[in-house]
Image (cartoon, helix red, strand yellow):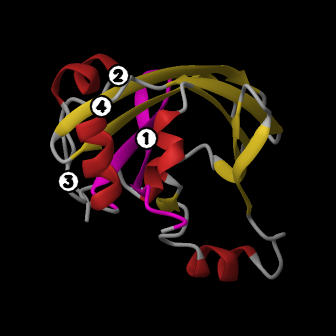
Amino acid sequence: EFLAVKCMDPSCLLSVVQDRCGWYLCKLEDNIYNIDFVRFKIRELETNTVLFEISKPPHSGTDEEHRERDVSAGRFVRYQFTPAFLRLRNVGATVEFTVGNRPLNNFRMIERHYFHDHLLKSFDFDFGFCIPNSCNTCEHIYEFPQLSESTVCQMVDRPYETRSDSFYFVDNRLVMHNKADYAYNGGH
């Protein structure tokens, strides 16, 4: 579902937007730069242990077939981790993405993580400039907040009630909005 919002520059988003309960704040067509995330990896920094990794399969078939099959793919991800993930302090998230035939000026991501309606942490990462028709790899370091034991227990006991919104901007214009939810009961 799409929700039209008048003010969607980064400063407005940081001051106003809360978890939107399933609403997307931009349309798929707003990604006029053809930004496509093709690989994602999360690693624990201290031991360099890979905690999660996923890649898109290679593209085959016509662009039209690909577009029809992929209309809503990539906007939502569901993660499952062990409870130990909630006690990590720092992780590295490596993303690989391709860019269409337009340059990306001031490519930026704002990611907000919630448990129920409580904002756990907001992250703000700058990708900078990306040349047209390029494949780019970038690692961002996430510094996690210290959670109380009570909050950790609740997050483990309530799978997929921890959620995030990822907002992507080019030249301060919202071009993509992705969502994820998280379970921390893996191994149980």
What's drawn in magenta, residue-wise? 160-187
Estimate the spatial distance between the alpha carbons at disc 1 and disc 4, rounded to whole Å: 14 Å
Q: Earlier in the sequence, mark 3 or mark 1?
A: 3
Instruction: Give residue 107's mark.
Output: none
The amino acid marked with disc number 3 is Leu
Secondary structure, mark 2, is helix
Mark 1 and mark 2: span between their CA atoms?
Answer: 12 Å
**SS type, badge 1:** strand
- Residue 25 visible? The answer is no
Gap between marks 4 and 3 measured at Cα: 23 Å
Q: Residue at x 53, y 43 (%)?
A: 85
Circle nearer the N terminus (4, 3): 3
For disc 1, the marked residue is 166
Q: CA distance from mark 2 to mark 3?
A: 17 Å
According to the picture, the residue beneath numbered tag 4 turns out to be: 120
- Residue 10, which numbered label? 2
Q: Indicate the amino acid at tag 1.
A: Ser
- How packed mark 2 is, by other alpha carbons closer than 10 Å (few <14, some 14-19, many 20 or more), is many
Q: Please check the rendered image and state whether residue 1 is part of the magenta-colored stretch, yes or no.
A: no
Q: Which mark is residue 3?
A: 3
Of marks 3 and 1, the one in the foreground: 1
Q: Residue 137, how many percent across, how many down? A: 79, 35
Residue 126 occupies quadrant: top right
Distance between the Cα atoms at labels 3 and 1? 15 Å
Would you say 150 lies left or right of 32 here? left
Mark 4 or mark 2: name the one nearer the start of the chain.
Answer: 2
Q: Residues within 10 Å of mark 3 (few under 14, many from 20)?
A: few
Residue at 33 percent across and 29 percent down: it is: 147
Instruction: Give the prevailing secondary structure in the magenta stretch.
Output: strand
Residue 138 percent location from the top left of the image: 74, 30
Badge 1 vs badge 2, beta-carbon distance below 8 Å = no
